[in-house]
Image (cartoon, rainbow, N blue to C red):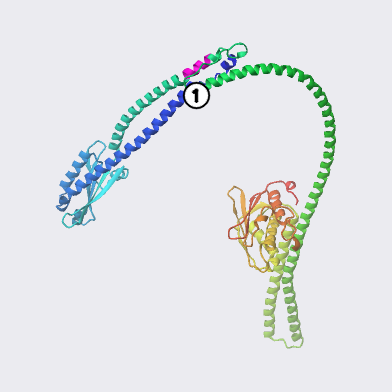
Amino acid sequence: MTTRDNRHPKPSLYHNLATTIVISVIVIMASYSGYRYLVIKESVIEQMKQRSQLTLNALQLNMAPLLEAYAIHEYEQLLETEIKQQHHFALIVEDFNMGQLLGKTAYMTGKMATTDGSLTDYDPDSLPQQRALQAIYYQQSLPIHSPSDDTLLARITIYIDDNALNRELQQLIMQHLVISIALTLLLIATLFASIRRIVFAPLSGIIDYISNSGEGGVPQQAIPEQKYREIALLASAMNQMVDSIKASKDELQHQHQQLLKNESQLRQKSIELSQLNETLEERVEQRTQELSAANQELELLITTLKKTQNELIEAEKMASLGGLVAGIAHEINTPIGVGLTGMSHFDEEIQQLKLKYEQGELEEHDFKEFLDTSAELSRTILASLHRAADQVRSFKRIAVDQSHTEIQTFSLKEYVDEVLLSLRNRLKQTQHQIKLEIDPKLEMTSDPGSISQVITNLITNSLLHGFEPHQWGEITLSAKPAQSPQQLEITYRDNGKGIAPQHRNKIFEPFFTTRRNSGGTGLGLNIIYNVVTQRLKGTIKVSHPEQGGVEFRLVLPQTLTPKPEQLPDM
């Protein structure tokens, strides 16, 4: 036991207690000294302010007759005397009486102390003097009125630096510091002597009695009675512990014999337990095989579910493309109908012109009228055909982009315009307005088909879930560079009825919809989430503005660089 104690020496209670006492006394005295410093400082500052007030009051009384008499030299002598006697930094006078005589607001004069202890005249145009006055510790002003008619003659300002304050504080602090150190040392010495006599001397006696042990490390003698109650309680507890150890030693010998007897019984139980473990291992192996078979069935079921989900997603894409075809067909039908009508009219005009020509009734004004009508009809037909061609070209690009994954560089504004053109037939059936806030010069190198799919599904989701029938609404789509480099931030928001709080955590889950009875599949936002995070390598977050509606914030890489085979075909 002695060897172990020497190998791992314990910290000394006396040293720890002494350190605690020293630190505590020092902290207490330091706190008290800090408090006394603040009190002394406030007292010195207050005395300084009182002295400055007395100086101003004296100057106010003595300078009034001099100001009325325009005796500048005399009151400057008075200022100089005050500064030398009271050790002020500066006394500045704004002489309104002299200023009125000179045609100015005030005549500025005064005296200032320099670094070498001499005095200099105040110059209001001197930048060093102005900087010195701005950095002054304390200043106070007092007006001077005429004793006869209470007219404002001047204003005097006293400036006091902190040099005198610091000197007085240092002197008082040194006196207090010497007293504090003496009290601290006296208090520490008194505490040390008292603790050693009251606590550690009796403890050393107890340790000596305990160390006098016989065979087995049990003390041979009991600890005598102690003077102080706490030490006496400790000695009594130690004596009781020694008696308990002796009784426990006898009990331990008895238990040792009982332990030997139980050991043979334990061996028998161990044999029985070994046999039970063998039976348990057989059962565990059987359960493991059953669990493995169940896992295989579960993996097959998961594979089937994923396949079904992909088929549903593909069906959703084809349904979206079918809706696009129907809308484009309706849009193309209008300009083609206008073209057919124009061609029919054109044919009638030709037949009438031919008839007049054959009957010999064709006149010059008839031919001019035919030419004017022909020109107008050709312009109308050409405009309608151009419009139909634009619709076909837009549909072709959108359809090809949605059915193939290909990275291209394109103008985001132009491509969004084409997507909205393909949706115009559906948007015309509503009263909603779509606002674009996209720089025409903003370009992306990405998968345009995925961009089209995301925008189409967002608009479709707003039309289906965000607005009530016949309700006017506004959809805003904006894009700008994100805070992260080489990233674009696309924000989509509508001012519809928003998303119910109980549904907000589920909107990106597959097959979740609140319009299942109205044809909703619950795949729109799930497709958007998968396209953004997997195919476009971006992020999407939804928020709910206080004014209502919903806002989707997409952060996408401006240049998408993965290989084509790495892009998932959703």
Say whether residue 477 is left or right of residue 36: right
Relative to residue 264, is residue 51 depicted above or below?
below
Q: Position of residue 416 (x, y in %)?
A: 66, 59
Residue span colored magenta: 200-208
In the rendered image, the quadrant that contains the N terminus is: top right
Q: Position of residue 285 (x, y in %)?
A: 84, 34
Along the line of sight, the residue nearer the viewer: 450 or 411 = 450
Q: Position of residue 279 (x, y in %)?
A: 85, 30
Residue 298 image-quadrant placement: top right
Relative to residue 76, is residue 379 depicted above or below?
below
Is residue 117 a member of the stretch shown in magenta?
Answer: no
Name the residue at 68% across, 82% down: 369
Instruction: Report the number of discs.
Output: 1
Please, what is the three-letter code of the amino acid marked with disc 1?
A: Glu
Name the residue at 44% across, 19% down: 197
Query: Principal SS element in the magenta part?
Result: helix
Along the line of sight, the residue nearer the viewer: 142 or 261 = 261
- Residue farthest toward the top in the current orientation of the protein: 215
- Other-residue count near label 1 (Cα within 10 Å), few / some / many at <14 / 14–19 / ≥20: few
Q: Position of residue 453 (x, y in %)?
A: 71, 57
Along the line of sight, the residue nearer the viewer: 256 or 407 = 256
Q: Which secondary structure lies at badge 1?
A: helix
Give the residue pinned by disc 1.
230
Q: Is residue 348 visible?
A: yes
Along the line of sight, the residue nearer the viewer: 464 or 259 = 259
